[in-house]
Image (cartoon, grey):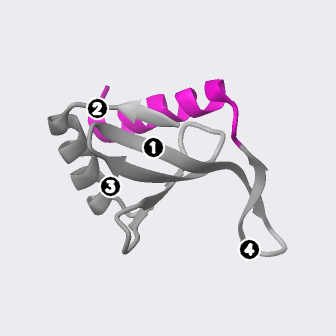
């Protein structure tokens, strides 16, 4: 799902993602971002585009004591869930 940003907002978002320890940039320009707060914990993949970005994958995450790590619980595919992730990204990285 695509989300619109101004050119300036997109530049700020990319800069903030590159500085964040819970975001990783891939060679194709996409980012994998883990959002721990506020709960629920989610992991998502986003692709910057000309006028914004697209969330191409998203999932709720759970922690396993046995595995001592996070694992994917449920994919987020519905429009409402993806819009909520957009708001969390904007709040964390753009202060919106």
Give how far apart the Cα atoms at labels 4 and 3 are: 25 Å
10 Å crowding of disc 2: few (<14), some (14-19), many (20+): some
Q: Position of residue 87 (x, y in %)?
A: 46, 28
Q: Position of residue 30 (x, y in %)?
A: 41, 61
Q: Quadrant of residue 53?
A: top left
Q: Position of residue 2 (x, y in %)?
A: 45, 36
* In-front residue for pair 73/82: 82
Residue farthest right in this picture: 66
Residue beneath label 1, please? Answer: 54
Q: Nearer the N terminus, badge 4 or badge 3?
A: 3
Report the predominant secondary structure element of the magenta stretch.
helix
Q: Residue shown at 53%/42% (left/top)? A: 37
Left or right: 34, with 21 as reference point:
right
Question: Dots 1 and 3: beta carbons under 8 Å?
Answer: no
Instruction: Judge whether 72 appears above or below 13 on screen.
Output: below
10 Å crowding of disc 3: few (<14), some (14-19), many (20+): many
Give how far apart the Cα atoms at labels 2 and 4 are: 37 Å
Q: Is residue 78 magenta?
A: yes
Residue beneath label 3, please? Answer: 17
* In-front residue for pair 21/83: 83
Considering the numbered disc 1 on the image, is that residue within a helix, a strand or a loop? strand
Residue beneath label 4, please? Answer: 68
Instruction: Judge whether 48 appears above or below 82 on screen.
Output: below
Range covered by the magenta-colored residues: 76-96
Q: Nearer the N terminus, badge 2 or badge 3?
A: 2
Considering the numbered disc 2 on the image, is that residue within a helix, a strand or a loop? loop
Question: Dots 2 and 1: beta carbons under 8 Å?
Answer: no
Q: Nearer the N terminus, badge 2 or badge 4?
A: 2
Q: Position of residue 40 (x, y in %)?
A: 66, 40
């Amino acid at each position: 799902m695509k989300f619109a940003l101004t050119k300036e907002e997109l530049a700020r978002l990319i800069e903030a993602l590159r500085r964040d320890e819970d975001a990783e940039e891939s060679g194709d320009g996409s980012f994998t971002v883990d959002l721990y707060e506020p709960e629920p914990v989610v992991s998502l993949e986003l692709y910057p585009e000309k006028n914004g970005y697209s969330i191409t994958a998203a999932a709720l995450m759970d922690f396993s004591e046995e595995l001592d790590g996070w694992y994917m619980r449920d994919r987020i595919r519905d429009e409402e869930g993806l819009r909520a992730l957009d708001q969390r990204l904007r709040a964390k990285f753009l202060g919106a």
